[in-house]
Image (cartoon, grey):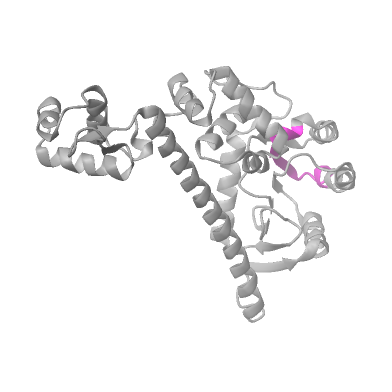
Amino acid sequence: MLVALGLNAESEAVYRAMLAHPRDGVSALAARLQLADEEIRRCLDRLSELALIRPSYEHEGELRAVSPDVGLEMLMVRQQAELAAQQSRIEASRATAARLIADFSDLRPAGAHPGVEQLRGLDEIRDRIAALAREAREDLMTFAPGGGQKVETLDAARSNDQVLLERGVRMRSIYLDSVRNSQPNVAYANWLTELGGEVRTAPELPTRMIVFDRATAIIPVRSDDSAAGAVVLTGHGTLTALCALFEHAWAGAQPFGAAAVKDHGGLSTQESTVIRLLAQGLTDDAIAKRLGVSARTARRAATELMDRLGARSRFEFGVRAVQRGWLPANE
């Protein structure tokens, strides 16, 4: 049960035994748990590293188990800090990769790598998207994270979208679930659907992306600023992978006109995603960014879920979410 906190089954058994029988020494624990003395000592070393046991203040040379409400809370705080640090490293790696792509594009000779092309600035990105859209004949697939679009952006897209659909291009777009709360985006999606376009939503998306005729993809170099620059990808292997990613996301996304679907636990897809992101240690701001909502909305969603379980802390919420079946035990 405590594997996610760094304890294997033997160490957890020793910890529980020490809580129940605080005066047991190594030999008594070994006999009680039917483990070798050496294994008991290894478990004690691990428990000491995790600060779940300490030297006794009353009996010199003896060890005492730290109470779970203190020890496990400290472990959870430490784990959340590690998860936050890991998320920071992932974001740093993503930024480094984007810079590497840009630097390589600057250094390579013209035409040296026809499968990757760098676009700089919003004007250049929009011009290339418009050119590729004019040439599209069969298929257009779009990931559109970031929440609701501005009214002027939606209005500007209508004429181009109508031309594509009248030409017979199959248009499929996946937005975040949060756009269902934006009236302009709902109106646009309904209009697009009436003309033959297909729209679905998902609780989160990996990146912004447009794929034209399964042959050319445009992806921003920075997930937090799509106007900073983009890459045009045409390599066969790369496009095969990106199309597979889209198809996988499409299969799991919810058709826009369909009623909200809840799982066996009574959770919407967005609620399930919030629970998973909370378990990963993400802050309200980070969750808001992933879902395309405000930090206030993300905070309210987390609070409402905690209230449903009667949890007073995020640690307690994690425990109760596992007990309720909202999270797998190893989450």
Figure quadrant of residue 222? bottom right
Q: Nearer the viewer, residue 11 or 115?
A: 11
The answer to whether residue 151 is left or right of residue 210 is right
Locate residue 130 relative to residue 12 in the image: left or right: right
> Could you tell me which residue is drawn at 12 percent across and 33 percent down?
35
The answer to whether residue 235 of the structure is visible from this angle is yes
Residue at 34%, 32% in the rendered image: 2
Is 219 in front, or is 163?
A: 219
| 277 on left or right of 163 | left
Q: Give the residue drawn at x 19%, y 33%.
A: 59
- In front: 294, or 256? 294
Magenta stretch: includes residue 277: no
Label tally: 0
**Is residue 170 covered in magenta?**
yes
**Up/down of 142 relative to 230, above or below:** above
Residue 287 in the image, given as x and y percentages of width and height: 62, 39
Q: Does 68 appear above or below 6?
A: above
The segment highlighted magenta reads: 164-179
Quarter of the rendering occupied by the C terminus: top left
Q: Tell me the quadrant of the picture where the N terminus can be found.
A: top left
Q: Position of residue 275 (x, y in %)?
A: 55, 31
From the viewer's perspective, is 39 left or right of 83? left
**Residue 221 x/y as whole percent:** 66, 60
